[in-house]
Amino acid sequence: MNDFIQLDFPSLLLGTLAALSCGLLGNFLLLRGQALMGDTISHVVLPGIVGGFLLAGSVAALPMMLGALFASLFSVSLIELIKRAGRIEAGAAMGAVFTTMFALGVVLLEQSGARGVHLDVEHALYGNLESALWLEAESFQDLLSFSKLFSLPEDIWVLFFITLLVILFIVVFYKPLMITSFDAAHADSLGISSKWMGLGLVFMTALSAVAAFSAVGSILVIAMFICPPATARMLTDKLSTQLWISGFIAVLSGISGYFLAAFGPFWFGGQDSVSAAGMIALMAGFLQVLAMLFAPRYGVLSRLFFKNRFHNQ
Protein backbone atom coordinates (compact mmCIF):
# COMPACT_ATOMS: atom_id res chain seq x y z
CA MET A 1 0.00 0.00 0.00
CA ASN A 2 2.95 2.34 0.62
CA ASP A 3 4.11 1.72 -2.94
CA PHE A 4 0.62 2.49 -4.19
CA ILE A 5 0.37 5.83 -2.38
CA GLN A 6 3.83 6.85 -3.61
CA LEU A 7 3.80 5.54 -7.16
CA ASP A 8 0.22 5.04 -8.32
CA PHE A 9 -1.98 7.45 -6.38
CA PRO A 10 -0.44 10.65 -7.84
CA SER A 11 -0.84 9.37 -11.41
CA LEU A 12 -4.38 8.20 -10.67
CA LEU A 13 -5.29 11.59 -9.22
CA LEU A 14 -3.66 13.48 -12.08
CA GLY A 15 -5.46 11.49 -14.78
CA THR A 16 -8.82 11.78 -13.00
CA LEU A 17 -8.54 15.55 -12.54
CA ALA A 18 -7.59 16.01 -16.20
CA ALA A 19 -10.56 13.90 -17.26
CA LEU A 20 -12.98 15.79 -15.00
CA SER A 21 -11.94 19.34 -15.98
CA CYS A 22 -12.06 18.58 -19.71
CA GLY A 23 -15.21 16.45 -19.51
CA LEU A 24 -17.30 19.14 -17.81
CA LEU A 25 -16.43 21.83 -20.36
CA GLY A 26 -16.98 19.39 -23.20
CA ASN A 27 -20.73 19.47 -22.53
CA PHE A 28 -21.02 23.05 -23.76
CA LEU A 29 -18.64 22.51 -26.68
CA LEU A 30 -20.79 19.56 -27.75
CA LEU A 31 -24.04 21.55 -27.56
CA ARG A 32 -22.49 24.37 -29.60
CA GLY A 33 -21.26 22.00 -32.29
CA GLN A 34 -17.67 22.86 -31.35
CA ALA A 35 -16.48 19.48 -30.12
CA LEU A 36 -13.44 19.77 -32.38
CA MET A 37 -12.38 22.91 -30.53
CA GLY A 38 -10.96 20.74 -27.74
CA ASP A 39 -9.15 18.65 -30.36
CA THR A 40 -7.72 21.81 -31.92
CA ILE A 41 -6.52 23.31 -28.66
CA SER A 42 -4.95 20.05 -27.49
CA HIS A 43 -2.76 20.13 -30.62
CA VAL A 44 -1.92 23.81 -30.86
CA VAL A 45 -0.55 24.05 -27.30
CA LEU A 46 2.56 22.06 -28.28
CA PRO A 47 4.57 24.92 -29.87
CA GLY A 48 3.57 27.16 -26.95
CA ILE A 49 4.85 24.59 -24.42
CA VAL A 50 8.15 24.25 -26.30
CA GLY A 51 8.41 28.04 -26.63
CA GLY A 52 7.85 28.46 -22.88
CA PHE A 53 10.58 25.91 -22.19
CA LEU A 54 13.03 27.59 -24.56
CA LEU A 55 12.41 31.03 -23.05
CA ALA A 56 12.57 29.87 -19.43
CA GLY A 57 15.31 27.30 -19.92
CA SER A 58 13.51 24.80 -17.67
CA VAL A 59 10.36 22.69 -17.45
CA ALA A 60 8.78 24.97 -14.83
CA ALA A 61 4.99 24.83 -15.08
CA LEU A 62 4.23 28.56 -15.19
CA PRO A 63 6.22 29.63 -18.31
CA MET A 64 5.16 26.52 -20.22
CA MET A 65 1.50 27.09 -19.30
CA LEU A 66 1.71 30.75 -20.31
CA GLY A 67 3.30 29.79 -23.63
CA ALA A 68 0.66 27.14 -24.26
CA LEU A 69 -2.15 29.51 -23.32
CA PHE A 70 -0.80 32.15 -25.70
CA ALA A 71 -0.56 29.56 -28.49
CA SER A 72 -4.16 28.46 -27.82
CA LEU A 73 -5.63 31.96 -27.90
CA PHE A 74 -3.55 32.87 -30.96
CA SER A 75 -4.80 29.77 -32.78
CA VAL A 76 -8.44 30.42 -31.89
CA SER A 77 -8.07 33.97 -33.22
CA LEU A 78 -6.40 32.61 -36.35
CA ILE A 79 -9.28 30.17 -36.91
CA GLU A 80 -11.79 33.02 -36.70
CA LEU A 81 -9.70 35.12 -39.10
CA ILE A 82 -9.50 32.28 -41.64
CA LYS A 83 -13.24 31.66 -41.35
CA ARG A 84 -14.16 35.30 -41.90
CA ALA A 85 -11.49 36.42 -44.38
CA GLY A 86 -11.30 33.22 -46.39
CA ARG A 87 -14.97 32.25 -46.00
CA ILE A 88 -13.87 28.73 -45.12
CA GLU A 89 -16.04 26.27 -43.21
CA ALA A 90 -15.25 26.11 -39.48
CA GLY A 91 -14.13 22.48 -39.48
CA ALA A 92 -11.73 23.07 -42.36
CA ALA A 93 -10.27 26.15 -40.64
CA MET A 94 -9.74 24.20 -37.41
CA GLY A 95 -8.12 21.32 -39.28
CA ALA A 96 -5.73 23.63 -41.11
CA VAL A 97 -4.69 25.48 -37.97
CA PHE A 98 -4.26 22.57 -35.57
CA THR A 99 -2.27 20.41 -38.01
CA THR A 100 0.01 23.33 -38.86
CA MET A 101 0.56 24.30 -35.24
CA PHE A 102 1.15 20.71 -34.12
CA ALA A 103 3.65 20.23 -36.97
CA LEU A 104 5.41 23.43 -35.86
CA GLY A 105 5.62 22.06 -32.33
CA VAL A 106 7.07 18.76 -33.58
CA VAL A 107 9.74 20.61 -35.57
CA LEU A 108 10.63 22.76 -32.56
CA LEU A 109 10.90 19.64 -30.39
CA GLU A 110 13.16 17.89 -32.86
CA GLN A 111 15.44 20.87 -33.43
CA SER A 112 15.65 22.31 -29.91
CA GLY A 113 17.16 21.01 -26.71
CA ALA A 114 13.75 20.07 -25.32
CA ARG A 115 14.19 16.38 -26.11
CA GLY A 116 16.81 16.08 -23.41
CA VAL A 117 14.38 16.96 -20.61
CA HIS A 118 11.65 14.36 -21.26
CA LEU A 119 9.72 16.72 -23.49
CA ASP A 120 9.31 14.98 -26.83
CA VAL A 121 6.77 13.93 -29.45
CA GLU A 122 5.98 10.70 -27.59
CA HIS A 123 4.99 12.57 -24.43
CA ALA A 124 3.06 15.11 -26.50
CA LEU A 125 0.82 12.30 -27.74
CA TYR A 126 0.10 10.38 -24.55
CA GLY A 127 1.72 12.40 -21.82
CA ASN A 128 3.94 11.36 -18.97
CA LEU A 129 1.31 10.34 -16.45
CA GLU A 130 3.33 7.56 -14.88
CA SER A 131 6.15 9.93 -13.88
CA ALA A 132 4.01 11.62 -11.20
CA LEU A 133 5.49 10.44 -7.89
CA TRP A 134 4.78 11.30 -4.25
CA LEU A 135 7.90 9.97 -2.58
CA GLU A 136 7.33 12.00 0.59
CA ALA A 137 4.20 9.98 1.38
CA GLU A 138 4.45 7.05 3.76
CA SER A 139 0.84 5.92 4.19
CA PHE A 140 -2.76 6.86 3.42
CA GLN A 141 -2.79 8.88 6.66
CA ASP A 142 -0.66 11.45 4.83
CA LEU A 143 -3.80 12.43 2.89
CA LEU A 144 -4.95 14.10 6.12
CA SER A 145 -1.69 16.00 6.59
CA PHE A 146 -1.56 19.44 4.98
CA SER A 147 2.23 19.52 5.10
CA LYS A 148 2.45 16.22 3.21
CA LEU A 149 -0.28 17.22 0.74
CA PHE A 150 1.71 20.31 -0.23
CA SER A 151 4.50 17.97 -1.35
CA LEU A 152 2.29 16.44 -4.06
CA PRO A 153 3.63 16.99 -7.61
CA GLU A 154 3.12 20.49 -8.97
CA ASP A 155 1.05 19.23 -11.92
CA ILE A 156 -1.56 17.84 -9.54
CA TRP A 157 -1.99 21.14 -7.72
CA VAL A 158 -2.23 23.03 -11.01
CA LEU A 159 -4.92 20.68 -12.31
CA PHE A 160 -6.72 20.73 -8.97
CA PHE A 161 -7.09 24.51 -9.02
CA ILE A 162 -7.99 24.51 -12.73
CA THR A 163 -10.72 21.94 -12.04
CA LEU A 164 -12.08 24.09 -9.20
CA LEU A 165 -11.99 27.10 -11.54
CA VAL A 166 -13.90 25.16 -14.22
CA ILE A 167 -16.58 24.12 -11.71
CA LEU A 168 -16.87 27.71 -10.44
CA PHE A 169 -17.15 29.01 -14.01
CA ILE A 170 -19.98 26.59 -14.80
CA VAL A 171 -21.83 27.31 -11.55
CA VAL A 172 -21.61 31.09 -11.90
CA PHE A 173 -22.39 31.26 -15.62
CA TYR A 174 -24.62 28.20 -15.92
CA LYS A 175 -27.71 30.02 -17.16
CA PRO A 176 -25.91 32.21 -19.76
CA LEU A 177 -23.93 29.21 -20.95
CA MET A 178 -27.08 27.13 -21.29
CA ILE A 179 -29.05 29.79 -23.20
CA THR A 180 -26.20 30.73 -25.56
CA SER A 181 -25.43 27.06 -26.23
CA PHE A 182 -29.00 26.22 -27.25
CA ASP A 183 -30.04 29.47 -28.97
CA ALA A 184 -27.44 32.21 -29.42
CA ALA A 185 -29.85 34.59 -31.18
CA HIS A 186 -32.39 34.32 -28.35
CA ALA A 187 -29.62 34.94 -25.82
CA ASP A 188 -28.56 38.11 -27.64
CA SER A 189 -32.17 39.32 -27.65
CA LEU A 190 -32.23 38.87 -23.85
CA GLY A 191 -29.08 40.95 -23.45
CA ILE A 192 -26.79 37.97 -22.92
CA SER A 193 -23.76 38.29 -25.19
CA SER A 194 -23.27 34.99 -26.98
CA LYS A 195 -19.95 36.30 -28.30
CA TRP A 196 -18.47 36.98 -24.87
CA MET A 197 -19.80 33.74 -23.42
CA GLY A 198 -18.27 31.90 -26.36
CA LEU A 199 -14.92 33.59 -25.77
CA GLY A 200 -15.10 32.77 -22.07
CA LEU A 201 -15.78 29.13 -22.86
CA VAL A 202 -12.89 29.00 -25.33
CA PHE A 203 -10.58 30.58 -22.73
CA MET A 204 -11.56 28.01 -20.08
CA THR A 205 -11.20 25.22 -22.63
CA ALA A 206 -7.72 26.42 -23.48
CA LEU A 207 -6.83 26.66 -19.78
CA SER A 208 -7.99 23.10 -19.10
CA ALA A 209 -6.27 21.69 -22.18
CA VAL A 210 -3.02 23.45 -21.32
CA ALA A 211 -3.08 22.21 -17.71
CA ALA A 212 -3.80 18.63 -18.78
CA PHE A 213 -1.59 18.46 -21.85
CA SER A 214 1.86 18.20 -20.29
CA ALA A 215 0.75 15.41 -17.96
CA VAL A 216 -1.62 13.33 -20.06
CA GLY A 217 -0.90 14.34 -23.66
CA SER A 218 -3.22 15.13 -26.53
CA ILE A 219 -4.90 11.70 -26.70
CA LEU A 220 -6.55 11.92 -23.29
CA VAL A 221 -7.37 15.62 -23.68
CA ILE A 222 -9.24 14.96 -26.93
CA ALA A 223 -11.05 11.93 -25.53
CA MET A 224 -12.19 13.70 -22.37
CA PHE A 225 -13.55 16.74 -24.18
CA ILE A 226 -15.77 14.51 -26.30
CA CYS A 227 -16.53 11.07 -24.81
CA PRO A 228 -18.00 11.82 -21.33
CA PRO A 229 -20.37 14.58 -22.55
CA ALA A 230 -21.36 12.57 -25.63
CA THR A 231 -22.10 9.56 -23.41
CA ALA A 232 -24.07 11.67 -20.94
CA ARG A 233 -26.03 13.28 -23.77
CA MET A 234 -27.38 9.87 -24.76
CA LEU A 235 -28.60 9.23 -21.23
CA THR A 236 -30.54 12.45 -20.55
CA ASP A 237 -32.10 15.49 -22.19
CA LYS A 238 -31.58 17.73 -19.15
CA LEU A 239 -28.37 19.76 -19.15
CA SER A 240 -27.90 19.86 -15.37
CA THR A 241 -28.24 16.08 -15.19
CA GLN A 242 -25.93 15.74 -18.17
CA LEU A 243 -23.22 17.68 -16.33
CA TRP A 244 -23.41 15.37 -13.32
CA ILE A 245 -23.37 12.24 -15.49
CA SER A 246 -20.46 13.47 -17.61
CA GLY A 247 -18.47 14.25 -14.45
CA PHE A 248 -19.16 10.78 -13.09
CA ILE A 249 -18.17 9.14 -16.39
CA ALA A 250 -14.96 11.20 -16.54
CA VAL A 251 -13.99 10.13 -13.00
CA LEU A 252 -14.96 6.51 -13.69
CA SER A 253 -12.89 6.51 -16.89
CA GLY A 254 -9.91 7.95 -15.03
CA ILE A 255 -10.01 5.45 -12.18
CA SER A 256 -10.85 2.31 -14.16
CA GLY A 257 -8.51 3.22 -17.01
CA TYR A 258 -5.55 3.75 -14.71
CA PHE A 259 -6.09 0.50 -12.78
CA LEU A 260 -6.44 -1.47 -16.01
CA ALA A 261 -3.29 0.12 -17.45
CA ALA A 262 -1.18 -0.33 -14.32
CA PHE A 263 -2.38 -3.73 -13.11
CA GLY A 264 -4.51 -5.25 -15.90
CA PRO A 265 -1.63 -6.77 -17.89
CA PHE A 266 -0.34 -8.58 -14.78
CA TRP A 267 -3.80 -9.99 -14.07
CA PHE A 268 -3.74 -11.63 -17.50
CA GLY A 269 -0.17 -12.87 -17.37
CA GLY A 270 1.55 -9.90 -18.98
CA GLN A 271 4.89 -8.48 -17.90
CA ASP A 272 4.56 -4.74 -18.52
CA SER A 273 1.96 -2.11 -17.85
CA VAL A 274 0.49 -0.07 -20.72
CA SER A 275 -0.02 3.66 -21.28
CA ALA A 276 -2.33 4.99 -18.58
CA ALA A 277 -3.52 7.94 -20.68
CA GLY A 278 -4.29 5.64 -23.60
CA MET A 279 -6.24 3.21 -21.40
CA ILE A 280 -8.23 6.04 -19.78
CA ALA A 281 -9.19 7.27 -23.25
CA LEU A 282 -10.06 3.69 -24.24
CA MET A 283 -12.35 3.30 -21.23
CA ALA A 284 -14.07 6.59 -22.05
CA GLY A 285 -14.69 5.32 -25.57
CA PHE A 286 -15.91 1.96 -24.25
CA LEU A 287 -18.45 3.64 -21.97
CA GLN A 288 -19.66 5.71 -24.91
CA VAL A 289 -20.16 2.56 -26.99
CA LEU A 290 -22.19 1.04 -24.14
CA ALA A 291 -24.39 4.13 -24.07
CA MET A 292 -24.83 4.03 -27.84
CA LEU A 293 -26.04 0.45 -27.54
CA PHE A 294 -28.02 0.40 -24.30
CA ALA A 295 -29.11 3.98 -23.48
CA PRO A 296 -32.82 3.74 -22.48
CA ARG A 297 -34.09 6.22 -25.05
CA TYR A 298 -31.39 6.64 -27.70
CA GLY A 299 -29.48 3.35 -27.57
CA VAL A 300 -29.56 1.27 -30.74
CA LEU A 301 -30.49 -2.02 -29.06
CA SER A 302 -32.97 -0.33 -26.72
CA ARG A 303 -34.81 1.26 -29.65
CA LEU A 304 -34.90 -2.05 -31.50
CA PHE A 305 -36.27 -3.78 -28.42
CA PHE A 306 -39.07 -1.28 -27.89
CA LYS A 307 -39.82 -1.18 -31.61
CA ASN A 308 -40.23 -4.95 -31.75
CA ARG A 309 -42.26 -4.94 -28.58
CA PHE A 310 -44.57 -2.28 -30.02
CA HIS A 311 -45.09 -4.27 -33.23
CA ASN A 312 -45.78 -7.49 -31.29
CA GLN A 313 -48.55 -5.76 -29.40
Image (cartoon, rainbow, N blue to C red):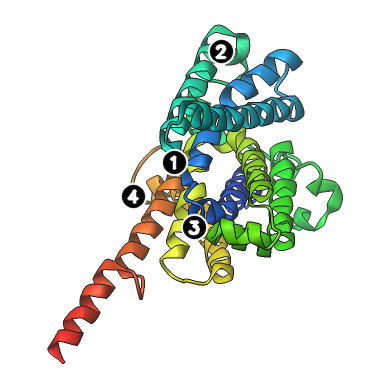
Q: Residue furthest top?
A: 111
If you read the primary sequence from the N terminus, does the residue marked by circle 2 or circle 1 appear first?
2
Kind of element beneath mark 4: loop
Cβ–Cβ under 8 Å for marks 4 and 1? no
**N-term mark: 4 or 2:** 2
Mark toward the start of the polypeptide (3 vs 4):
3
Residue found at the very far front of the displayed protein: 189
The answer to which image quadrant residue 190 occupies is: bottom right
Identified at 59% across, 33% down, the residue is: 76
CA separation, marks 4 and 2?
Answer: 40 Å
- Residue assigned mark 4: 268
> Which percent across, then down, holds residue 234?
41, 66
Residue 46 vs 260, above or below: the answer is above
Q: Nearer the viewer, mark 1 or mark 3?
A: 3
Label 1, secondary structure: give it. Answer: helix
Looking at the rendered structure, the kind of residue marked 3 is Pro
Write down the residue under mark 1: 278
Amino acid type at image mark 1: Gly
Numbered circle sitting on residue 108? 2
**Where residue 214 appears, x then y in whole percent?**
61, 32
